[in-house]
Image (tube, rainbow, N blue to C red):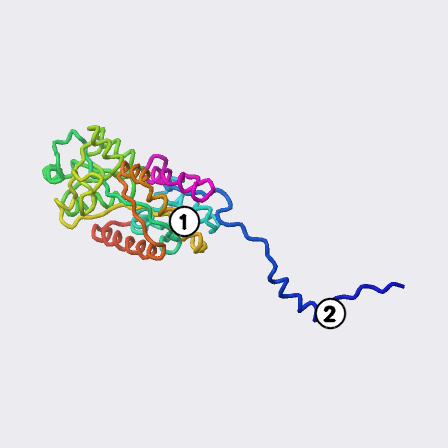
């Protein structure tokens, strides 16, 4: 009767173990495995949306996967932020964060549904820009000083509008520093406030530099000043507010973020690829037409940057005595 094959001895198994462990294993799929979704927390046509679409296409080429822009407007940015935070932290759902959603919201929105410091992982700083102070062209003013004098002679008769909390803060800081009594009007988005300024329903507004500059050059609104401490290199002919109100200086920035727990390798690759995209001269030229100046920062420093911005805007809100709504 033929004998049955013997089972391998323990010694033989242990001897073969190193070879088994050294054998090639199936590699995990490299990121990204599928299309990447970037959530924009404001409607199409806003500066955040335009900026995201400008860099999404070249980023897609670098990553080898489609990069899809998903507009989730509403709730002053909260709807889009919540949608991003509800997605898996695997690098396939990201969100564009700006001053309004990342820095001023904690001080301006009551019962905010997220904490920027705790819930957002900064990935890459994209660009920054000043706001542009524009007024109804039918007002008999051609400078910030003239607007202030005109408003002081008519307390409560002029108004300004805003489409986001950060713009409200900028407008109220100007009124505070100039000693003006000017009621403000809230809008769902900045395009509506800009339109109403052109049509005379608003006296003035702080709008995105790119859009408002086009309207000013067409004569639909009148440009008076940029909100940064220095003049913008993108429109050096326009004075800064600090030239009339010394010490004034606020700007808007844009940052790509993800969820806490995002793999460091994904964060670093995104930061590197976006820096490469934003270095392309053709893209920088397109951004300049939108009033945007490219900025970049290492991921390790971005969390500190975000915390500093939250504190800066918080101090302004406290100075103005604003309460969350």
Give x and y (percent) for residue 36.
Answer: 46, 43
Q: Is residue 44 magenta?
A: yes
Quarter of image, res 41: top left
- The residue pinned by badge 1 equals 270
The mark nearer the N terminus, 2 or 1, is 2
Q: Which residues are magenta?
A: 42-71
Q: Which residue in the rendered view is the most extreme toward the right?
A: 1
Count of numbered circles in the view: 2
Residue at image location 51% in from the left, 50% down from the top: 30
Nearest the viewer among 255 and 281 is 281
- The residue pinned by badge 2 equals 9
Does residue 250 appear to the left or right of 69 in the view shown? left
Nearest the viewer among 179 and 265 is 265
**Residue density around tag 2, few if under 14, some if 14–19, many if 20 or more, within 10 Å:** few
Nearest the viewer among 14 and 158 is 14
Does residue 188 appear in the picture of this structure?
no
Give x and y (percent) for residue 216.
Answer: 21, 32
Check residue 113 in the rendering and tell me which mark sits there, or answer none. Answer: none
Q: Is residue 166 above or below residue 217?
A: below
Does residue 267 appear to the left or right of 154 in the view shown? right
Does residue 35 appear in the picture of this structure?
yes
Label 2, label 1: how far apart the Cα atoms are: 51 Å
- Marks 2/1 in contact by CB < 8 Å: the verdict is no
Badge 2 marks a residue whose secondary structure is loop
Residue at image location 44% in from the left, 52% down from the top: 266
Nearest the viewer among 308 and 5 is 5
Q: Is residue 132 magenta?
A: no
């Amino acid at each position: 009767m033929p004998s049955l094959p013997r089972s391998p001895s323990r010694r033989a198994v242990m001897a073969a173990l190193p070879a088994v462990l050294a054998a090639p294993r199936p590699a995990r799929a490299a990121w990204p495995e599928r299309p990447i979704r970037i959530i924009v927390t404001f409607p199409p046509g806003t500066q955040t949306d335009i900026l995201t679409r400008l860099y999404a296409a070249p980023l897609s080429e670098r990553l080898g996967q489609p990069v899809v822009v998903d507009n989730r407007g509403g709730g002053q940015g909260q709807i889009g932020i919540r949608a991003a935070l509800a997605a898996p932290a695997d690098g396939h759902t990201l969100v564009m964060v700006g001053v309004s959603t990342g820095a001023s919201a904690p001080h301006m929105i009551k019962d905010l549904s997220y904490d920027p410091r705790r819930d957002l992982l900064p990935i890459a700083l994209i660009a920054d820009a000043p706001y542009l102070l524009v007024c109804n062209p039918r007002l008999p003013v051609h400078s910030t000083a003239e607007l202030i004098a005109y408003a002081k002679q008519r307390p409560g008769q002029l108004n300004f509008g805003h489409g986001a909390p950060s713009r409200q803060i900028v407008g109220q800081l100007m009124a505070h520093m100039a000693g003006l009594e000017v009621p403000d009007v809230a809008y769902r988005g900045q395009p509506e406030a800009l339109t109403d300024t052109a049509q005379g329903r608003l006296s003035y507004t702080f709008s995105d530099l790119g859009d408002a500059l086009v309207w000013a050059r067409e004569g639909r609104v009148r440009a008076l000043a940029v909100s940064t401490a220095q003049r913008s290199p993108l429109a050096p002919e326009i004075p800064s507010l600090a030239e009339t109100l010394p010490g004034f200086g606020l700007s808007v920035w844009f940052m790509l973020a993800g969820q806490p727990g995002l793999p460091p390798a994904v964060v670093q690759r995104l930061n590197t690829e976006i820096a490469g995209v934003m270095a392309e001269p053709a893209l920088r030229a397109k951004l300049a037409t939108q009033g945007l100046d490219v900025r970049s920062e290492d991921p390790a420093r971005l969390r500190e940057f975000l915390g500093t911005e939250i504190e800066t805007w918080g101090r302004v809100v406290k100075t103005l005595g604003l309460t969350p709504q």
